[in-house]
Image (cartoon, rainbow, N blue to C red):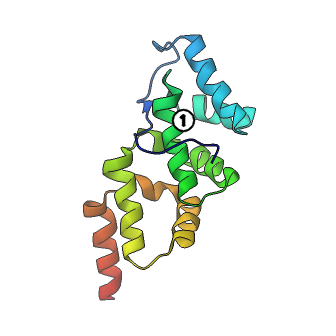
């Protein structure tokens, strides 16, 4: 899709003050890229100020792969934007080590691709949970009820 290819993690810098080391050109490039994908001015403001999410200068290596992977899961363009705006911390997660294992685990529970996409869209924070410390113990507890 238009989101690009997956394969590397997408990361925003951890909470960076407004006086970040990123140049205005770097911020503008990231914001211009997201805008070209349909992110509204309000969504961009949410990402860059409300949540303190600052994007690095390398759109190709950081932002595009993560958005591409969400699209490959079956999320529509609108759903990808909703996920990112609802859980901008997703860019701080490690795609290969944290996010993908959660999705593969959900599939292992019997969820098909469209159900996983719907679940991620409704509950994007799942991509930030630890499998071993959070998700697996909770599911085990529910099974024991």
**Quadrant location, the C terminus:** bottom left
Residue 18's x, y, as percent? 53, 17
Identify the residue shown where x is 57% and y is 70%: 114
- Kindly indicate the quadrant of the structure image that contains residue 143: bottom left
- Whether residue 113 is situated above or below residue 9 in the rendered picture: below
Mark 1, residue position: 51
Identify the residue shown where x is 31% and y is 57%: 130
Q: Secondary structure at mark 1?
A: loop
Mark 1 Cα shell of 10 Å, populated few (<14), some (14-19), many (≥20):
some
- Kindly indicate the quadrant of the structure image that contains residue 106: bottom left
Q: Nearer the viewer, residue 20 or 112?
A: 112
Left or right: 79, with 65 as reference point: right
Left or right: 52, with 137 as reference point: right
Residue 27's x, y, as percent? 58, 19
Residue 91's x, y, as percent? 46, 40
Left or right: 137, with 57 as reference point: left
Identify the residue shown where x is 64% and y is 46%: 81
């Amino acid at each position: 899709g238009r989101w690009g290819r997956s394969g590397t993690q997408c990361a925003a810098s951890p909470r960076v003050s407004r006086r970040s080391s990123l140049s205005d050109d770097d911020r503008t490039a990231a914001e211009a890229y997201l805008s070209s994908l349909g992110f509204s001015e309000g969504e961009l403001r949410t990402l860059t100020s409300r949540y303190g999410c600052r994007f690095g200068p390398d759109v190709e290596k950081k932002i595009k792969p993560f958005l591409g992977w969400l699209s490959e899961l079956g999320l529509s363009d609108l759903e990808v934007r909703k996920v990112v705006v609802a859980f901008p911390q997703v860019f701080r997660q490690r795609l290969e080590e944290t996010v993908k294992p959660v999705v593969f685990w959900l599939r292992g529970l019997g969820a098909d691709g469209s159900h996983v996409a719907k679940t991620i869209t409704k509950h994007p924070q799942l991509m930030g949970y630890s499998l071993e410390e959070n998700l697996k113990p909770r599911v085990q507890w529910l099974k024991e009820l």
